Image: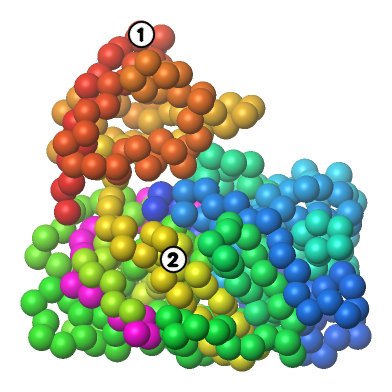
Amino acid sequence: MNTPFFCFQPRLAGALLLLLLLVPALARPARGQGPDAPPFRLGRARQRRVRVPLRVERNLPVVQVWLNDSGPYNFLLDTGVAVSLLTEAAIADSLHLRHGQDFRVVGAGGEATGLLAYRAPGVRVRLGRPGQEAVAPDMALLVLNADSLDLSGYVGLPIHGILGSELFRSFAVAFGANGAEDLTLTRPAFQRPPRGHRWARVPLAIEGQKPYFIAEVRQAGDAAPRPLKLLLDTGASHALSLETTSDPALRLPAARLPAELGRGLSGPVRGVLGRVATVQLGRYRLPTVLTSFPDAADVHARADVFRNGSLGYDVLRRFRVVIDYPHQCLWLHPGPTFREPFEHDMAGLDLFAMGPALRRYRVLRVMPGTPAAAAGLEAGDELLTIGLAPVGVFTLTQLSRLLRSADGTVVHLVLRRPSGELRAARLRLQRRI
């Protein structure tokens, strides 16, 4: 008997590509649950809602999770994933998780990757503090035999897994309630429309256990916007991604930059960065939104549900957000960062976190024709200081913000070449799109 497979498809997330498509068997409910039974429940029977700490790194939301009462482990919170997964097999081994059905992992084009995975049923998953917690007493996780995407190095924080649709099917999930970085999980029976005239309601369609919605997007030069079907993707750090193969009316913008949009299991996915004129979300219009345009046709062709693209966390972070699968709606309220401009990396380099504390940073790649290339930076260089400060005092999130802070900003660096040679560099940031 052949081993079943599941497919990783690219999802643009800055330097990360990760969209998980799973065969339906992976999402089957635990014993005794109906096909639509929510896996999570609140820790106390009479509770209506709980608040759970949330951390945002590199435009990606992260929560702490306990597995079989061991942990905590850091999990990305991701509406773009139908089935939650554990990316470190060593954790599964240490917890003696059951080894269920095996799967082979293939890339977006159907090519073999050499990776294997298995279904681990019967895992108790918990998040939140005692008295303010949500628990899934009998959940299945997908366990990868290797973290080939190295999420920790990209995020700059140890990442052990991804928590997907199971949490969102169980609660109305509010991000940034009262301006705080936390989650509020409300039992569906007690969720009410948020109060206040500034809240906007956007209908959601839950297909394949993922949320889709219609946004009005106007491309540069168009007189009117076009309704586009987008995946709502909390696990993507970009603002907007559009797949031109999905609609002949979608086109690449005249002002654009060739770019490596991310990396998947089969290597880099290339395309261009540009902007659209406006994105309309309910009553709110966002101008000049930075947009990724992947050039790989199979990003669209192998999607499990038709879509024109995806909306990521760089848009969502500008709002207070309620994602309500049970009532099929998205609520948006402008937050403190609503009017921040959408900016790209102004240096032209990708940094990768390494070392035991993930506070050493190596240049992963340098894009030709950019300030980093002009300053002589090369892939493999290790960043030692910025100004007079050692890089260990910065998180990767802080470094990323610095490198997209303002056009014309001059940054002084000291780097170490793989040969051990020390080199000083003067980097002048440049807005290129």
Q: Is residue 351 above or below residue 342?
A: above
Q: Say which residue label 1 marks.
A: 421
Percent coordinates x, y for residue 55 in the rendering: 60, 52
User: Mark 2 packing: few (<14 Cα in 10 Å), some, or many (20+)?
Assistant: some
Q: How crowded is mark 1: few (under 14 residues within 10 Å), some or many (20 or more)?
A: few
Image spot of residue 17 (x, y percent): 45, 57
Q: Left or right of 338: which side holds 102?
A: right
**Above or below — where is 335 with respect to 62?**
below
- Quadrant where the C terminus sits is bottom left
Q: Which of 2 and 107 is in front in this view?
A: 107
Instruction: Read off the residue under disc 2.
Output: 335
Label 1: state its secondary structure. Answer: loop
Give how far apart the Cα atoms at labels 1 and 2 are: 46 Å
Magenta region: 263-283
**Extreme-front residue of the structure:** 196
Residue 422 occupies quadrant? top left
Q: Residue at x 81, y 47 (%)?
A: 71
* Residue 300 shown in magenta: no
Residue 28, relative to residue 351: is it above or below? below
Residue 25 in view (yes/no): no
Q: Report x, y in % for residue 176.
A: 56, 64
Task: Report the quarter where the N terminus lies.
Answer: bottom right
Disc 2 residue type (three-letter): Gly
Q: How did the renderer colour the structure?
A: rainbow
